[in-house]
Image: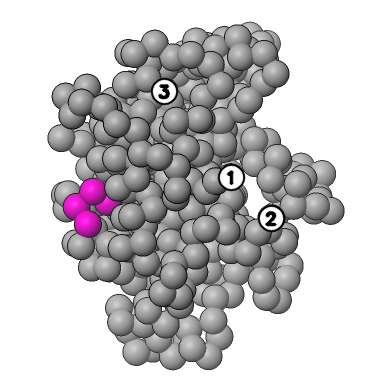
Amino acid sequence: MSTSTLPRPEAPAASRLRLIDCDIHPAPRDLAVLDRWLPERWRRHRQEYGLRLRQPFATGHPYPKATPALSRYDSWPPGGGPPGSDLEFMRQQHLDLLDIEYGMLQPLAARGMDERNPGFAAALSSAVNDWMREDWTAREPRLKATIAIPGEDAAASVREIERWAGQRDFVQIAMVSRALEPLGRQRYWPIYEAAEHHGLPLGLHSLGTSGHPVTGGGWPSFYFEEHQAVAMSMAALCASFILEGVFDRFPRLKIVIIEGGFGWVPSLGWRMDGLWRSLRSEVPHLQRKPSDYLKSHLWFTTQPVEEPERPEHLRRLIDWIGRDRLLFATDYPHWDSDDPRYAFKLPLSEPERRAILAGNARAVYGLA
């Protein structure tokens, strides 16, 4: 039975918990939709050259996906278009079915940060933001947008942040997790300064075509390898932010790790703390042990939630990370998306359930 046909839970309105979903993927019906907001020069560029990503393949994705468009078979809109492209169908299949109060849009089909041409990267990021505002959040108040930026160009990124900061439809800044350089490097710091100044969390989704393989050992043979290696790349990302001193320079910066799981977080903290005892002279700018930064500046979405054979192991993970660090996400409409009624294979107390499914996100994003 598909998620779209599962019975909707019934509960008194006063006691029912409305969800905040921190990872919903909208898609344009086709890339020509974005031409409405591209200047003529870049409209012609897109039509003549298409998207030119930093990857060793001329067309397509670096790896084959488990299902077409990486999506559930039942998520294809009946009126045509790819999964995530039909707002009314998304309302029926997802927002209404699960009683979602707010959903964070994370567009994947076009990302300026991945583009080789820096001018087109900036124009594409702006067009994606206009598209989210006009075609999505203006039509559906439950949806909130992320500010797409051409992250390899810090100055252009700051200009795009300034364009949208303060508009209630945009609640965070989006960057890909696989960049040209480790994201803790100072070339990216103007972005973090702008994020801190405007009180906008930085949402780092587990993707990007930087031209570098996701693993430390080269390009893997299978999508299976690439998919599980996301945890390695996210651990390296967090270490870069912490050890480069980003949080010491920007103490109010919030970072949300999206679609990277969280089972790896305690071991990363333990390993960095152990090495810090011997190597702290190399990083004198760190004011606290590394694991403290993990617990004070970083949040993690639940999808894909780890499912150990013994549920008490998941309980220990959550206890170490802190229940206030976890934000619920479905990853709709992807094939491995999570239904909140079945996502956690362990009992949660009522305060834990309310915090993870809605309360934590409400606090991080400043939602009313």
Q: Amino acid at mark 1?
A: Asp
Q: Is residue 352 above or below residue 230?
A: above
Against 179, residue 203 (above or below) is above
Residue to which mark 1 is pinned: 336
Picture disc at residue 293: none
**Which residue in the protein does label 2 denote?**
66
Number of other residues with Cα within 10 Å of mark 2, as a class: few under 14, some 14 to 19, many 20 or more: some
Res 85 visible: yes
Q: Residue at point 32% right, 21% down?
A: 354
- Membership of 27 in magenta stretch: no
State the CA–CA distance, disc 1 to disc 3: 22 Å
Residue 327 position (above or below residue 87): above
Q: Position of residue 199 (x, y in %)?
A: 24, 38
Residue where numbered disc 3 is placed: 325
Front-most of residues 48 and 196:
48
Name the foreground residue: 351 vs 39: 351
Q: Nearer the viewer, mark 1 or mark 3?
A: 1
